[in-house]
Amino acid sequence: MKISFDNIRAEISRKGWTIEQFCKELGISKNTFYSWEEKGDLPLSKCLKMSSMFHKSIDYLIDIDSLSAS
C-alpha cells in the first residue's frame, strides 16, 4: 500500500516549516524524505514521531481514508 504525503505536506506548511526544517526536526535528510514520498513508503517510527510533532493521528497523516477508497 502506497501512502499519501498530501496531509504530511499540509501539516509542514501549517507549521510554517520548509521541507529542510521539517527534515531537521524529524532527524532525516531531504533526500530521505523525497525518496519516501516517491516510493509511498514511511517507517513506522517516523510516522509515530510525525504524529506527535503535528498532534495528528497516523491515519490522518497518511490519508488512510483516501487509500481505502481506491
Image (cartoon, helix red, strand yellow):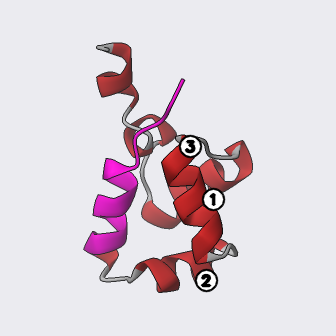
Q: Is residue 10 above or below residue 28?
A: above
Q: Quadrant of the C terminus?
A: top left
Q: Which residue is mark 3?
A: 39
Q: Which residue is mark 2?
A: 24
From the image, state whether disc 2 or disc 3 is nearer to you.
3
Residue beneath the point at 26% across and 71% down: 14
Q: Position of residue 32 (x, y in %)?
A: 65, 65
Say what secondary structure mark 1 lies in: helix
Of callouts 3 and 1, the N-terminal one = 3
Q: Is residue 49 above or below residue 12?
A: above
Residue type, label 2: Lys
Q: Main secondary structure of the magenta part?
A: helix
Residue type, label 1: Lys
From the image, state whether disc 3 or disc 1 is nearer to you.
3
Q: CA distance from mark 2 to mark 3?
A: 21 Å
Picture quadrant of residue 15 = bottom left
Of callouts 2 and 3, the N-terminal one = 2
Q: Which residue is mark 1?
A: 49
Closer-to-camera residue (36/51): 36
Q: Position of residue 43 (x, y in %)?
A: 70, 46
